[in-house]
Amino acid sequence: MVGGPNRRIACIGKAIPLFRKQLSLGDRTDLGSYLDKPIQRMTSYSLLLQELMGECSTENTQERRNLRAAMEMVQFQLQHGNDLLAMDAIRECD
């Protein structure tokens, strides 16, 4: 593990105030749930951009180019995330 156990302890120590604040607010959500939400939004963004492309007039080529560029970026990020998950799964098979 990079940094070893001392680094892990230091990270945990920095997270304790966050956990205390969560408990004081009655928030029992784990960190993984917070990290899932942005990933789920990326899929929503992709669908939204596809819908916008369908509504965009064929006359407005600059708007279509911008939407297509945004769609490509979102789709690339989604594919990259899936690739990272696949690589992580492969490593766990050792």
Image: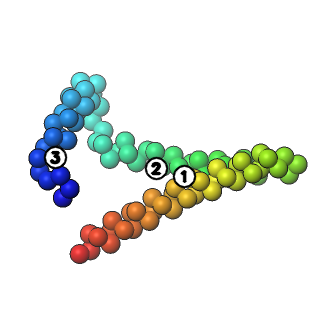
Picture residue at 28% right of the left edge, 25% below the top: 25
What residue type is disc 3 on? Arg
Q: Earlier in the sequence, mark 3 or mark 2?
A: 3
Question: Residue 15 appears in which quarter of the rendering?
Answer: top left
Label 1 Cα neighbours within 10 Å, binned few <14 / some 14-19 / many ≥20: some
Pointer 1 with pointer 2, Cβ within 8 A: yes
Pointer 1 with pointer 3, Cβ within 8 A: no
Along the line of sight, which residue is nearer the eye, 28 or 60?
60
What residue type is disc 2 on? Ile
Q: Provide the secondary structure element on which disc 1 rests.
A: helix
Along the line of sight, which residue is nearer the eye, 77 or 41?
77
Q: Position of 36 compared to 42: left or right?
A: left
Q: Position of 30 compared to 11: left or right?
A: right
Q: Position of 37 compared to 49: left or right?
A: left
Picture residue at 30% right of the left edge, 42% below the top: 31
- Residue topped by disc 2: 39
Picture residue at 15% right of the left edge, 40% below the top: 10
What residue type is disc 1 on? Thr
Q: Position of residue 66 (x, y in %)?
A: 71, 47
Q: Position of residue 44 (x, y in %)?
A: 57, 48
Residue 51 appearing in the image: no
Q: CA distance from mark 3 to mark 2?
A: 27 Å
- Residue topped by disc 3: 7
Q: Position of 57 compared to 91: left or right?
A: right
Residue at far left of view: 6
Q: Provide the secondary structure element on which disc 3 rests.
A: helix
Q: Position of residue 71 (x, y in %)?
A: 64, 53
Q: CA distance from mark 1 to mark 2?
A: 7 Å
Label 2 Cα neighbours within 10 Å, binned few <14 / some 14-19 / many ≥20: few
Pointer 3 with pointer 2, Cβ within 8 A: no
Task: Say which quadrant the C terminus sits in.
Answer: bottom left
- Residue topped by disc 1: 43
